[in-house]
Amino acid sequence: MGVGRNYALLLNEIHLTMNKFYLFYSAEVNAAVNMNGKNVLNFMTVRNMRVIKKEVIKVYTRMLE
């Protein structure tokens, strides 16, 4: 019995969760900018959201290598 199927299911679940994180934080950053202007990009909460988005992209990049 291999781990192939279980591993694929786990990767799929991780992929779906990361997509949800990325889409949620993208929408939140866009909403904050639309409501308050670009100066909101310097707020710590928005900066943290952008860091999460960047980390998701890094994970995807590593998975594709």
Image (tube, rainbow, N blue to C red):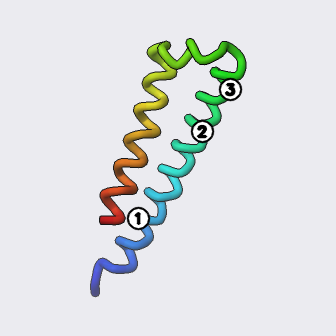
- The alpha-carbon separation of the residues under discs 3 and 2 comes to 11 Å
- The alpha-carbon separation of the residues under discs 1 and 2 comes to 20 Å
Instruction: Check disc 2 and report the residue beneath it.
Output: 24
Instruction: Check disc 3 and report the residue beneath it.
Output: 31
- The alpha-carbon separation of the residues under discs 1 and 3 comes to 30 Å
The extreme right residue here reads 35
Tag nearer the camera, 1 or 2 = 2
Local SS, label 3: helix
Q: Earlier in the sequence, mark 1 or mark 3?
A: 1
For the C terminus, the image quarter is bottom left
Q: Is residue 45 above or below residue 26?
A: above
Give the amino acid at mark 1.
Answer: Leu
The residue sitting at 58% across, 37% down in the picture is: 26
Determine the image quadrant of residue 63: bottom left
13 or 29, which is in the foreground?
29
Q: Is residue 49 above or below residue 62?
A: above
Determine the image quadrant of residue 3: bottom left
Provide residue 59's location: percent of width, then percent of height.
35, 52
Local SS, label 1: helix
Provide residue 45's location: percent of width, then percent of height.
49, 18
The residue sitting at 48% across, 14% down in the picture is: 42
Give the amino acid at mark 3.
Answer: Ala
- Local packing at callout 3 (Cα closer than 10 Å; few below 14, some 14-19, many 20+) is few
Instruction: Check disc 1 and report the residue beneath it.
Output: 11
